[in-house]
Structure formats: C-alpha cells, structure tokens
Image (cartoon, grey):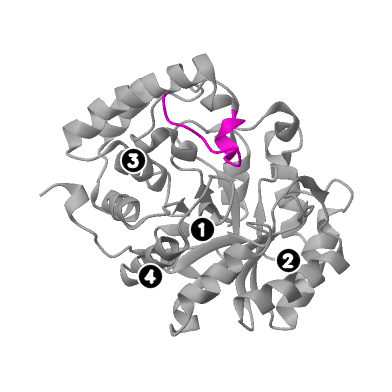
Amino acid sequence: MSASDRTPKPAQRALGAAGPLTSALGLGCMGMSDLYGPADESESIATIHAALDAGITLLDTGDFYGMGHNELLIHDALRGRDRSDVQISVKFGAQRDPSGQWVGYDTSPAATKTALAYTLRRLRTDYVDVYRPARLDPTVPIEETVGAIADLVKAGYVRHIGLSEVGADTLRRAAAVHPISDLQIEYSLLSRSSEAAVLPTARELGIGVTAYGVLSRGLLSGHWNTERPLAGTDFRGHSPRFQGDNLTHNLALVEALRDVATAKGASVAQVAIAWVASRGEDVVPLVGARRRDRLAEALGALDVELTAADLAAIEAVVPAGSAAGERYAADQMARLDSER
C-alpha cells in the first residue's frame, strides 16, 4: 500500500513553549477564498470537514482573505462542531480597498483591537487561539502591537500571540513584551532563507514555527506544468518563480525530486511536506489543500519517514538556494522584515 492510500491521524506538536498542542499538520484556508483563483465553496467546506475528521485541529486564516469571506467560511464549516476541538489562527493588519487592492498595513493598538472584534463576529466565537499581525507594520513598534494583543489575552479574547514573517531582532523585541507561541513563515525546499538567523532565534526563544507555502505555492505539488492557465486574481501570475525561464528551471527541480519520491513510494508533494516536518518537532507544516483529494495526498505525508539517506538525496537534487526567482515580487520582498 502506498503512502497516498492511507490517511493516518496527525500526531500532536506544540506551538512553542508558550503555545497550544495542535495537530502535526495544519490546514491553511487562504486559497479557499482568495489569491489562488476561483474556489468551490461547498468543496472548501467539505475539505475542512475532511481535515477535522482526519484529526487536523489547526485552521489558519486571515481577516483579509477574501475580505472576511474566509472567516465566514470557517464559521460555516465549524457549525455543529465542538469549538474546543479546534485551534483557529488568525492574521490581521493587511489593508485592502473595495477592489481588493493592497493599501498597506495597520497594526496600531486601536486597529488591532477593532480587527479582532470583527473577526470574533465573523467566526461567531468568543476567542481565537492564536492572533498575529500578518506583517511588520513599519509605522508601529512591534512592542505596541504585541502589547495590544497582550491586553486581548488578559481579557480572554485571545489565547496565544503569534507573529508572521518577522526577523530575528523583531522576534526578540516581541518576546520581551509577551510570550510568543509561534512564528508563521514561508518554509519549503525552495524557500530556506529563514534557516540562517530567523529559525535559530525562534528556537533560542522557545518560539514554534508554523510553516506555510510548504509546496511553494503549488510548484512542489508535482501537479504543476508550464501550460497551466492562471486566473487574473491568482497571485502566482505575478510571482517571479512562476514566470518564463524561472518556471522551467523550478519544474526541473521538481522532476528531480520526483525520482526521489518515486523511490520512496510517495508523491512529490508528500516528500516535500515530510521534508518540512523533518526540520524539527517545533515545526508544524500548513498545507493549503482546497479539495479533498489534495488533502488526502497531503495527509499521506505523515506516513513518509525520511531517513538520513533520503534527506541527503533530497538535498542533492534540491539544494538550498536552488530556486529561480524570489518568492515575492521585488517591492513585496523589500517589505518583509524576515528577509532583512
């Protein structure tokens, strides 16, 4: 029986020294509402149900995913379920206009508390398990933002404080104000810049990692090709890694990885997810499945045990820094505190 034929229950991992126990895989729900082109709402809800039934307890969202649609979707999916069985992680701070265009960030204390009020209303819940700014707001000291969330923790509206895409210095400053459960950051075979300073600092401070983009926006899914059409609303239509020669180069890396996966009796996606999970017990990969079949494949990664020889083989075909193109366009990369 191949790994894809089984859907084992995810084991648990802790989100850092200060965070909750969650499933060893989390479900990133962004693509169900935004940024990856059209999605089927009924299939999205069915996928969340399948994830919960398989033992996934961590659902990741953002209040700006579909301008609130994603939170409403999660509320619908959780209807009739025990709220205490699920950890909901919410990002906030990204500002968008009615057309969906990005217009900056606001993580000031007042905006932070207002955003949470709307999130609680959309989710129809009394609290969120992890609340985090989506990016560092260059106009607001991180101490002020974390302090505001700490107020919400004291009031019982938030259980844990997280961060997203911040650098080592920001991690230290934030942790000096309040314990931080986890850092959410893009981490995959094609995105490993955080290994130099950010991840070691997180570990020094007892901060866990929720890794998003583990399949590098679909590049490492094993299902991508150069002919795949992209909707105008699909983020990947503007991502450097999906353009021209960059895409050709990156897909060649995927084909080399496919040989390693085939030898393991696994799919490319399963090996890519298993590699992220192998980085440490403090790392929880977030899989962005929008359909039940993709979710079942991702769950199969739990059955893939990578030996030292396997890891060496993976490193040989997809070494650090081998991806062509940055993970975001230049203007967005310049705004990432984690890349400075």
Q: In this picture, which residue range is highlighted in magenta?
A: 227-239
Specify few, some or many for label 4: CA neighbours under 10 Å numbering under 14, 14-19, or 20 or more. Answer: some
Q: Looking at the picture, which amino acid does disc 1 mark?
A: Cys
Q: Residue 44: within the magenta?
A: no
Q: Position of residue 112 (x, y in %)?
A: 80, 66
Precedes in sequence: disc 2 or disc 4: 4
Q: Looking at the picture, which amino acid does disc 2 mark?
A: His
Residue shown at 57%/22% (left/top)? 325
In the structure shown, which secondary structural element does the residue marked by tag 2 occupy? Answer: loop
Residue 49: image tag: 4
Q: Which residue is mark 2?
A: 178
Precedes in sequence: disc 3 or disc 1: 1
Classify the position of the C terminus by image quarter.
Answer: top right
State the separation of the CA atoms marked 3 and 4: 21 Å
Answer with the quarter of the image where residue 158 lies. bottom right
Q: Nearer the viewer, mark 2 or mark 1?
A: 1
Q: Nearer the viewer, mark 2 or mark 3?
A: 3
Residue 29: image tag: 1
Residue shown at 73%/40% (left/top)? 337
